[in-house]
Image (cartoon, rainbow, N blue to C red):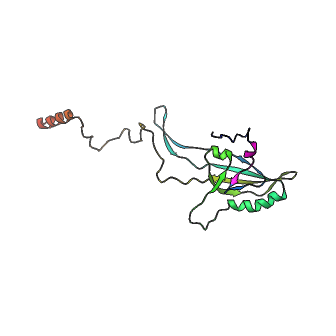
Amino acid sequence: MGLGQNSPISEPSSWDYCLVAGTECPGWCEVSGWVRSWGWQEKRGKGVQGTTLTYTGKPSAKGTIKFYLTTDEDFEDWDTFYPLFKYDPTRQTIQGIDINHPALQALGIKACVCEDIGQPEHEGLALWSITVKLIEYAPPPKAPAVATPAGADNGKAGVNAGVGTAPPAPTNPLITKVASLITELGAP
């Protein structure tokens, strides 16, 4: 998974916090629900086994970070930390916020946008939590990433394939010579 030196066994404290736009979170946090997916379209032929797969892209990952606040200082720090997640609709382009946590690093997630922020929830005793739902910020590259594997049927072959089109020109010179002789002799 690419966790390297940030194993939760040998470095548990590195899993207790995250950095958002370079700022360490107040209290401690729990990252959950993140899954890296790849999009595939399955094309099944009639009367045959198997499928042709076409890669359709890598969708943005979604997940949550639950922040736990236990002191008045944590709540004060939250007031300055929370605005990092806010979306500014006056900007011309969407901007992701840098995010750093070992679990997200393992999935290649480096920036996110906020989907929603929950209210403070009382967990019992002096423990409060706030859940933030995030979407990976991953704008598409300039070139599309849609491709069908080499040798796969692109869906153009079938019963009516080639109807109404001229046959391909022969590439073998002997075939060309035979075709010209047939034309000269007037054979059908």
Q: How many labels were placed on the picture?
A: 0
- The image quadrant where one finds the N terminus is top right
- In magenta stretch: residue 18: yes
Asked if residue 188 shows in the view, the reply is: no
Residue at 59% in and 44% down: 37
Q: What stretch is highlighted in magenta?
A: 12-19
Picture coordinates of residue 135 (x, y %)? 63, 53
Q: Which residue lies furthest to the front in this view?
A: 5
Q: Residue furthest top?
A: 49
Residue at 70% in and 40% down: 7
Residue at 71% in and 54% down: 132
Picture coordinates of residue 31 (x, y %)? 71, 47
Task: Using residue 159 as the reference point, say whether residue 30 is left or right of it.
Answer: right
Q: Which of 98 and 114 is in front in this view?
A: 98
Residue at 17% in and 33% down: 178
Q: Which residue lies furthest to the bottom in this view?
A: 90
Task: Using residue 174 as the reference point, say whether residue 153 is left or right of it.
Answer: right
Residue 9, placed above or below residue 85: above
Q: Which residue lies furthest to the right in this view?
A: 125
Q: Which of 158 and 174 is in front in this view?
A: 174
Residue 151, placed above or below residue 126: above
Where is residue 8, by image quadrant?
Answer: top right
Asked if residue 40 shows in the view, the reply is: yes
Residue 25, placed above or below residue 151: below
- The image quadrant where one finds the C terminus is top left
Picture coordinates of residue 166 (x, y %)? 26, 43
Picture coordinates of residue 72 (x, y %)? 84, 59
- In magenta stretch: residue 68: no
